[in-house]
Amino acid sequence: MKELMSQWDGTVYPDLIRNMPEADIPMDGVRGWILQSGDRQAVFFDIEPVGEVPPHSHCAQWGVVLEGEMSLTIGDETKTYRKGDWYYIPENVVHGATFLSRVNVIDVFDAPDRWKVK
C-alpha cells in the first residue's frame, strides 16, 4: 500500500479520485476532490500537518479517517481520531481540528454546495 501511495503523491487516493474536480479550499496544505450529488457532497481530503483549523460550523458532516491522525473538537468534546475512526458533526455544531501529521479523510456534507470547485 505504501508503494501505491508514493505513486499517488503520498495520498491513499489514486488518479480515479485525484482527477475529480478539486475543491477551492482557501488554506495552504489542504486539498480535496469533490464527488457531487443532487443534495449531498463528498470530499476526499488530503491535509498536510497544517496545525489548527479554527472553530466553525456549517451543515451536517460525517467523516472517516483513512490515514494519519487528527484531534477533532465537536462541541465541547475533543478526541483523537486515527485510521478507521469515523465522526459525525450535527448541523450548526461548532467544531475545529488540529492536524499534526498528514491526514486523508473522506467527509460527506449534508449540502450540495459546501465546497465550490476550484
Image: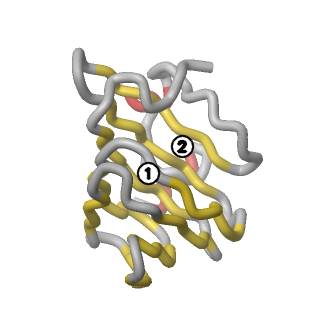
Residue 99 position within the rendered picture, expressed as x and y whole percent measured from the top left:
60, 70
Residue toward you, 58 or 44: 58
Q: Residue at x 37, y 52 (%)?
A: 92
Q: Position of residue 83 (x, y in %)?
A: 35, 72
**For the residue labelled by badge 1, is the local secondary structure a helix, a strand or a loop?**
loop
Marks 2 and 1, how far apart at CA: 7 Å
Q: Nearer the viewer, residue 9 or 60?
A: 60
| Marker disc for residue 57 | none
Q: Residue at x 54, y 68 (%)?
A: 97
Question: What residue is at 54 percent from the left and 43 percent from the top?
Answer: 8
Find disc 1 in the rendering and name its residue. Answer: 12
Q: Are marks 2 and 1 in contact (CB under 8 Å)?
A: yes
Query: In the rendered view, would you say 55 is above or below 62?
Result: below
Question: Quick check: can you spot residue 5?
Answer: no
Label 1 packing within 10 angstroms: few (<14), some (14-19), many (20+): many
Which three-letter amino acid code belongs to the residue tagged 2?
Trp
Q: Is residue 77 left or right of residue 23?
A: left
x, y percent for residue 106: 36, 49
Q: Amino acid at mark 1?
A: Val
Q: Quadrant of the N terminus?
A: bottom left
